[in-house]
Image (tube, helix red, strand yellow):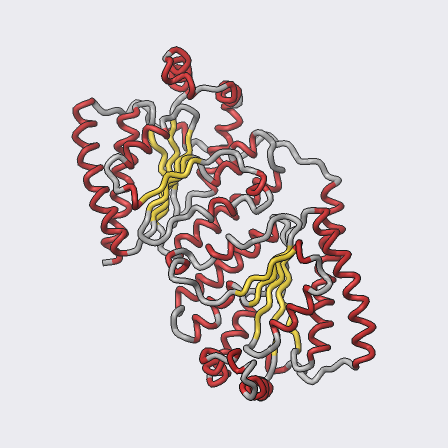
Amino acid sequence: MLKNIDLTREVAKEEYKRLKDDADLKLGCLQRQVKALGVPVIVVFEGWSAAGKGTLINELILPLDPRGFTVHSARGPTQEEAFYPFLWRFWKLTPTRGRMAIFDRSWNRRVVTDRVTGQVTGKQLRQAFEDIRSFERQLTDDGVAIVKCFLHISKNEQQRRFKALRASATTSWRVTNDDLRQHERYAEYLAAMEDMLVETDTDNAPWTIVEAHDRRFATLKIFTTVIDALERRVPAVERNAETPPTPASPNPFKTTVLDHVDLSLSLTPEEYATRLKKAQGTLRELEYEIYLRRVPVVIAYEGWDAAGKGGNIRRLTQNLDPRGYEVVPVAAPNDVEKAHHYLWRFWARMPKAGHITIFDRTWYGRVLVERVEGFCTEAQWRRAYREINGMEQQLAHFGTILLKFWLHIDAEEQLRRFQEREEVTHKRWKITEEDWRNREKMGHYRDAVEEMLHRTSTPYASWTVVESNCKRHARVKVLETVCEAIRKRLDHNA
């Protein structure tokens, strides 16, 4: 691919000025349109050292309103960022709706630089390609316009530019040892870049190769690429804006997972006290082990209203070191969170290596409450199964232990607990009108739960249904399941 590109293409100065002036006007107009329509835009610059990324980024942003974009320079992860999945730091930088994010290098470093230097090989490399494709598709499915430009120069041209930069005291600092190593291993980097372009070139986020020997030609090609992408995106958004959200349709997907849950399971107070104490002690020891071995753990709680999530989480954390875990209660998204992809706020709260994060309600709200209440379109919640599985797979590729619990009670037990909350003064705050309203839709929610359990129970992130009519049984089952999963992973990694 890269070997056969004609790098001698040029543009005359007079023609360049005429075309560039026209492109500046178009790009400024399109920025205002995407802002008005709430379209987030990501422009990625990858390519060789000394290919002119900084200069060309500056050309791109000059006609733009500086209040509407942010430029990110992505080098290797910091010491803190290395404790998270490699896409974590890029999720945090994704733009809000209507803004542009421009990346000088990006997440693709993982499959080029880290590959050539031997930090990522074999299975890790295959997983990285898979994670990148999944990440970009999640963003574009949510309406993000992604434009990816690869700046290509020959080895001789790179050497010429390095020599020119090093000849001046004011520019010599721009040539780093990493740049020189890239030049020395040009053939290896070329092969890795070829693979990156092939593996991550998709219909939703295609690559544009920019012949960068001539700055004027490269500038015009980048402008044309960005303008074309935004011009295609704007009318599509305007068309979709005329289509009202689709209400949740009756779900023909029928399974019997919940029908076979034995809700009669229970523990006597004596059994409960013994097993609870043992499991809590074991989990405290395992918390220390995962910290030493830098293993992240995510524990996700979903379940019916009044199923006992709060009490279950309290018993789970009762004996833990509070410096090693965090409980994240999930409510309706705020305005800032709504301006991002719905998974953005959950990525921001994922644990770093060696820590535990417990989510009291989760990203599954997309396929539960948002589906049933019509807060998203049918196309959006159907797409969410793939997006959620993709996110959880990315966490698993990083080595995260991911446990997902559905706390299940029957309608009669839920009614009893609702009535108890209304009657007991110190529990009254737990019951709201929304709880009663949700109960009336229990059949619709049950359909959503059944489909969720089926479509998102995977080898790397399976669901555990917890029989919760007896709170004692539910608390012990969760604790023992968590201990077993952590112990199994630690034994496997030993």
Q: Position of residue 368 (x, y in %)?
A: 51, 34
Q: Position of residue 88 (x, y in %)?
A: 46, 55
Q: Residue at x 75, y 61 (%)?
A: 27
429 left or right of 249?
left
Q: Residue at x 79, y 80 (%)?
A: 13
Q: Say if 451 sits above or below 348 in the image.
A: above
4 left or right of 299?
right
372 left or right of 402?
right
Q: Position of residue 132 (x, y in %)?
A: 51, 60
Q: Residue at x 25, y 46 (%)?
A: 287
Between 218 and 202, which is closer to the camera in this rendering?
A: 218
Q: Is residue 190 visible?
A: no
Query: Which image quadrant: the N terminus?
Result: bottom right
Q: Quadrant of residue 233?
A: bottom right
Q: Say if 150 sits above or below 414 in the image.
A: below
Given the current orientation, which residue lies at the most extreme top position?
Answer: 423
Q: Quadrant of residue 24?
A: bottom right
Q: Is residue 195 visible?
A: yes
Query: Which image quadrant: the C terminus?
Result: bottom left
293 left or right of 223?
left
Q: Position of residue 102 (x, y in %)?
A: 61, 61
Between 24 and 381, which is closer to the camera in this rendering?
A: 24
Q: Residue at x 52, y 72 (%)?
A: 195
